[in-house]
Structure formats: C-alpha cells, structure tokens
Amino acid sequence: MSALSRIQDDFQSFMLRAGRDIEAHVVGTPRVSIATRLAIYGDGYSSRLIEALEANYPALAKLLGPEDFAALGTAYVRAHESRFASIRYYGAELADFLAAHAEYVGAPLLAELARWEWAMTEAFDAADAAPVGIAALAQVVPDEWAALRFQFHPSLRQLSLFWNVPQIWKALTDDIERPASVVQAEPTEWLLWRENLQTFFRSLPTPEAEALNAARGGQSFGDLCAILARHFSEEETPARAAGFLKHWLESGLIVVL
C-alpha cells in the first residue's frame, strides 16, 4: 500500500470510527493542536450528516426539538456511515434504528413517523411513468378479465401504521396544532403515491389493502376477486373489485394493464 493510500485509509478510519492512526500524519502547533485540527473535519462530517437527516425528516426533527434531534442524529451517525454518492439518501435506516435503539424503543411513534417520512421521500423521488387511463378498460374483452394483471406506478408505497402518524405529520408540516398521539390495537394501511410533482396519501380499508397487495405481487384480477370474496358476498364481490380497480386507475396508480 502506498503512503497516500495509507493516509487516506487512516483518515477514513478517523472520520467513520474515531481511529487515531491519522494523528501520526498531522502536524500540530502550539496554537492549533492535532486534536483541534482533526476535530474540524470530524465534527464537520458529523454535522453535515445530521443536517441531511433533518432535511429528510423535518417533521421528526420538529417533534423532537433541536437538542433531542441532534442527540438522535449523533447516535445514528456513529452507527451508520454514509454509503451514498448523494447525501439525499442518507438516513434510510433511521426508522429501524429508532425501533431497536434502547433510548427510543419505548417511543414507537418516532419509528413510525420516520418510516412515514422516508416513504414520502421515496414516493417523491421515484421514477416517472405514464399512468393508464380509465378508458383502457374498454379495450379489455370479457374473456380476458380474469387473467388481467397490472403494473403499478414506481412511486406507490404502502405502510401499516399503528399510530396516527399521517395526522401528526400533517400538523407538524403545516405548523398547526398537533393532535394527541393515538395508538390502535390493529394497524391502518396507508397508500402513498406521486402524481406529477405532488405526493398524495390516503388510508386503505382492509379489503382494498389486501387486493392491492395481491395485485402488486402479480396476482390476476380473478385472484383479487377470490381475495375479496372473503369480505363480501358472491353477488357483491365483482362490483367491489371493479370499483377498486376504477379508483386505482383514476388515481394514476396503474401504468400497464
């Protein structure tokens, strides 16, 4: 290994793991010690990553406040180095970190809020795709309906949330009075997607959530009807399935029939 490579490795070790070998390559002075010089880089690296976390999780940052969010950011940066060319994607594991870390595991609302904000980011950043309009259904002949399968817009995300996170997120984002935190015995399914440059979300009733999960997994329209038959009568099921499909098309969720 060349001398330059060794210095680069030692410097990276200092930045990511507080390694001390880099000190042998740094010259200190009476006015500016080696530790001070290195801290300029080390503290700057950590601060920049915490700033990236705040940009990606503004509602969580507002909920916690500057001091507590800085503490969270410092702990997360110590556990997760940046692996991305763009700092935009730093913080993908924050929800899992909050759900497992001893300091935060007792406040599961925080992990769910982080999951929500990251899903919003993913939906906004997802690739573009032209949705199929409702008129496309007129091209499907009756014999093809049962085998009909769908491809969905890349921005589509689904989350199961026990807490009233979307309502809290909206209040924090709009800077209005935050509702009380509420947890449910059973989770609510939420759908997020982007249309043009605007991100939308809504809750999903259980039958629709099950049908959408199946459709996203490649199951056919006939399979969806079988799933919905567990919730509705034989006479009602086809209309319900068609209604969900119509809603997905009108929302721009489907890009290929």
Image (cartoon, rainbow, N blue to C red):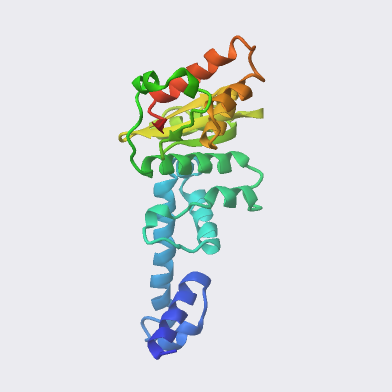
Residue pictured at 32% horizontal, 34% vertical: 130
Numbered-mark total: 0
Q: Quadrant of residue 227?
A: top right
| Above or below: residue 203 compared with residue 81 | above
Q: Residue furthest right?
A: 185
| Residue 33 percent location from the top left of the image | 41, 82
The C terminus: image quadrant: top left
Residues 244 and 170: in front is: 244
Q: Quadrant of residue 29?
A: bottom left
| Above or below: residue 117 compared with residue 37 | above
Residues 210 and 161: in front is: 210
The N terminus: image quadrant: bottom left
| Above or below: residue 65 compared with residue 181 | below
Q: Is residue 234 left or right of residue 15?
A: right
Residues 253 and 30: in front is: 253
- In this view of the protein, can residue 65 be seen by the observer? yes
| Above or below: residue 121 compared with residue 87 | above
- In this view of the protein, can residue 172 be seen by the observer? no
Residue pictured at 39% horizontal, 71% vertical: 41
Residue pictured at 56% horizontal, 40% vertical: 112
Q: Residue furthest top?
A: 235
| Residue 172 percent location from the top left of the image | 44, 34
| Residue 154 percent location from the top left of the image | 41, 40
Residue pictured at 40% horizontal, 24% vertical: 249
| Residue 14 percent location from the top left of the image | 48, 75
Residues 186 and 16: in front is: 186
